[in-house]
């Protein structure tokens, strides 16, 4: 064991690029080690395998991983670069650029792994087909079916959702009233609350925040929806005595990501493509400071378009009239330049509450009832004013 820990990766690569005699001389290089293999031939030494190529050890490792619960598992497999290629590239630095193997190397590969191919079949590069009834084929098919089918495969349609009519947002369609002012951000949050309470689509709503939810006035959802945590709430929140305390739970519906727009966008894409990957439509609403959106995760937004994602991106605190206390870095008036570059991103910069309601309902209809491959981007303000 001490000798194995003394050797670095470069040593192990060199050993396998040579032969058994070289390994005897350079690995078993002390009297004690030489005595261990004194009765071994060079071929015996050469057949010493790495754990990552030992089917028994690999099986044992995966068996332990599959049966381990409660935490992630990491398997470290020690392997040989170009394993099985022999002189054509095994353990050589040029292996990653090796595109072809000659007839002699292919026949050596066949002999080494005892493949049931004749010389003529090797020369023609024929595939081995064990047959549909072979145990390994049946096993692989069973596993693929358990995972939902073969890849590449795209489900373009899922069960359509019965989205609420425009009248469900009647409060946002009306004027704010004399002396009453609010922001379009607040109007959206109220609509989101209406959706979350809807008996038909509420369980499909996925609110995602890449900062403190209270920034957008979403604390009212903490108690009713809960913030998702894989371990639940294992501490007493500072505000537990308040009505809208910070409630975490294993079945929470809000994804509170912290300040990681890219991580939140990854969660959004997962939910926005669930109709294809899982056959279940989800309604992700990712709200964030608009200055920290497309300017930060633009490539992911393009990838979302490629993947035909469906959902809503909400650029909060946009505009150039408020939030100067946090500096000009928040003064977004140009994020639509980036969003316009994504062909299937439908972008809006609404001013009034009724506009937000109409746009939101239109997006719900197009994406979840008609199942169009688009996603919506709305910029929202935090300036309070009267709404017609």
Image (cartoon, helix red, strand yellow):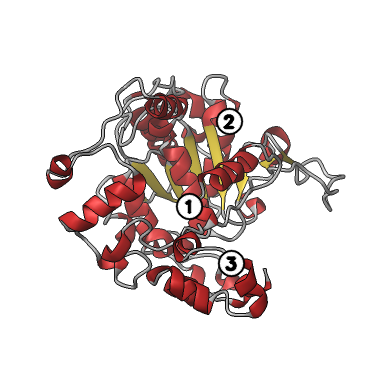
**Front position in the image: 216 or 321:** 216
**Front position in the image: 175 or 289:** 289
Numbered tag placed on residue 37 in the rendering: 3
Q: Which residue is drawn at the image coordinates 39% and 28% (left, top)?
A: 368
Where residue 56 sits in the image (x, y, percent)? 56, 43
Other-residue count near label 2 (Cα within 10 Å), few / some / many at <14 / 14–19 / ≥20: many
Where residue 216 sits in the image (x, y, percent)? 60, 51
Numbered tag placed on residue 53 in the rendering: 1
Q: Quadrant of the C terminus?
A: top left
**Circle 2 sits on which residue?**
196
Position of 238 with respect to 126 (left or right) is: right
Residue 9 visible somewhere in the drawing: no
Other-residue count near label 3 (Cα within 10 Å), few / some / many at <14 / 14–19 / ≥20: some
Q: Secondary structure at mark 2?
A: helix
Q: Is residue 36 above or below residue 214?
A: below
Q: Nearer the viewer, mark 1 or mark 2?
A: 1
Q: Earlier in the sequence, mark 2 or mark 3?
A: 3
Q: Is residue 251 above or below residue 198?
A: below
Where residue 241 sits in the image (x, y, percent)? 87, 45
Q: Secondary structure at mark 1?
A: helix
Q: Which residue is drawn at the image coordinates 59% and 34% (left, top)?
A: 193
Q: Secondary structure at mark 3?
A: loop
């Amino acid at each position: 064991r001490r000798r194995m820990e003394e050797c670095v990766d470069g040593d192990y690569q060199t050993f396998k690029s040579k032969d058994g005699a070289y390994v005897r001389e350079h690995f078993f290089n002390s009297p004690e080690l030489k005595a261990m293999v004194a009765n071994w031939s060079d071929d015996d030494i050469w057949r010493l395998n790495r754990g990552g190529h030992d089917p028994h050890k690999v099986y044992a490792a995966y068996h332990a991983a599959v049966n381990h619960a409660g935490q992630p598992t990491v398997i470290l497999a020690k392997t040989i670069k170009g394993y099985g290629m022999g002189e054509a590239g095994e353990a050589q630095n040029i292996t990653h650029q090796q595109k072809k193997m000659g007839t002699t190397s292919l026949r050596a590969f066949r002999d080494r792994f005892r493949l049931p191919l004749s010389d003529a079949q090797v020369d023609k590069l024929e595939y081995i087909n064990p047959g549909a009834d072979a145990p390994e084929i049946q096993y692989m098919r069973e596993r693929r079916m358990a995972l939902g089918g073969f890849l590449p495969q795209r489900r373009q349609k899922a069960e359509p959702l019965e989205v609420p009519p425009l009248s469900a947002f009647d409060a946002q369609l009306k004027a704010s009233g004399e002396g009453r002012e609010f922001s379009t951000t607040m109007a959206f949050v109220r609509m989101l609350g209406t959706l979350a309470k809807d008996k038909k689509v509420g369980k499909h709503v996925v609110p995602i925040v890449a900062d403190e939810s209270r920034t957008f006035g979403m604390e009212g959802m903490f108690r009713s929806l809960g913030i998702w945590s894989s371990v639940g709430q294992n501490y007493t929140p500072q505000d537990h005595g308040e009505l809208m305390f910070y409630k975490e739970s294993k079945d929470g519906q809000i994804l509170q990501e912290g300040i990681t727009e890219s991580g939140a966008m990854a969660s959004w894409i997962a939910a926005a493509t669930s109709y294809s990957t899982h056959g279940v439509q989800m309604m992700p609403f990712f709200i964030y400071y608009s200055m920290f959106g497309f300017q930060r995760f633009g490539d992911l937004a393009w990838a979302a378009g490629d993947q035909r994602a469906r959902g809503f991106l909400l650029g909060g605190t946009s505009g150039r009239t408020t939030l100067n206390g946090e500096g000009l870095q928040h003064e977004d008036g140009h994020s639509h330049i980036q969003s316009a570059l994504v062909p299937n991103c439908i972008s809006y910069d609404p001013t009034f509450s009724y506009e937000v309601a109409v746009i939101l309902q239109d997006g719900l209809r197009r994406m979840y009832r008609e199942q169009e491959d688009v996603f919506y981007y709305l910029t929202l303000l935090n300036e309070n004013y009267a709404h017609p």
